[in-house]
Amino acid sequence: MKLISAIIKPFKLDDVRSALSEIGVNGITVTEVKGFGRQKGHTELYRGAEYVVDFLPKIKLEAAVDASLLEQAIEAITSAARTGKIGDGKIFVFDIEQAIRIRTGETGSEAL
């Protein structure tokens, strides 16, 4: 089992969710986050004063998938989240040692 953690642009969330649903990913966790990478933020004008926005709004999406779905899930996220511009995001993959469904006690891939 693998945990996919993806940082994407907020307006791409619906596209990514749809793409993951199409390949059979049953559940995702979404968190609104702020951060920066190579984009380094930007400056904005507010009431005549210019100020720097260091941390940009992003969406952190997490999905636990069976190892057999990993490559499909990565491809689905990549194609749905890509705009071709700086700040499209990153995908990280972690191993999941164990998963347990609290309601039924199912473990492993059955708990996903």
Image (spheres, rainbow, N blue to C red):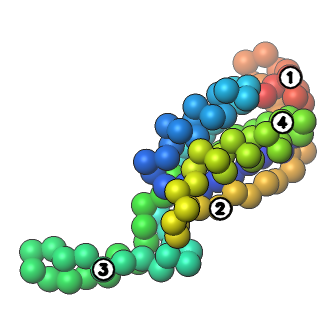
Q: Give the alpha-carbon distance from disc 1 to disc 2, as whole Å.
A: 28 Å
Res. 69 mark: 4
Give the secondary structure at mark 3. strand
**Residue beneath the point at 86% across and 23% down:** 110
Give the amino acid type for the residue marked by disc 4 in the picture.
Answer: Leu
Q: Observer-nearest residue: 89 or 56?
A: 89
Residue 100's quadrant in the figure? Answer: top right
Report if residue 42 is visible in the image. yes
Residue 75 percent location from the top left of the image: 73, 46
Estimate how packed mark 1 is, as few (under 14), some (14 to 19) or many (20 or more) residues with alpha carbons within 10 Å. Answer: few
Q: Give the alpha-carbon distance from disc 2 to disc 4, as whole Å.
A: 18 Å
Give the amino acid type for the residue marked by disc 3 in the picture.
Answer: Thr
Q: Give the alpha-carbon distance from disc 1 to disc 4, as whole Å.
A: 14 Å
Residue indicated by mark 2: 90
Asked if residue 37 lies left or right of residue 42, the reply is right
Q: In terms of sequence position, does the residue under pointer 1 or pointer 2 come before the other?
A: 2
Q: In terms of sequence position, does the residue under pointer 2 or pointer 4 come before the other?
A: 4
Give the secondary structure at mark 4. helix
Residue indicated by mark 1: 110
Q: In terms of sequence position, does the residue under pointer 1 or pointer 4 come before the other?
A: 4
Report if residue 98 is visible in the image. no
Residue 84 percent location from the top left of the image: 55, 62
Asked if residue 13 lies left or right of residue 67, the reply is left
Q: Give the alpha-carbon distance from disc 3 to disc 4, as whole Å.
A: 40 Å
Give the amino acid type for the residue marked by disc 1 in the picture.
Answer: Glu
Q: Give the alpha-carbon distance from disc 2 to disc 3, as whole Å.
A: 23 Å
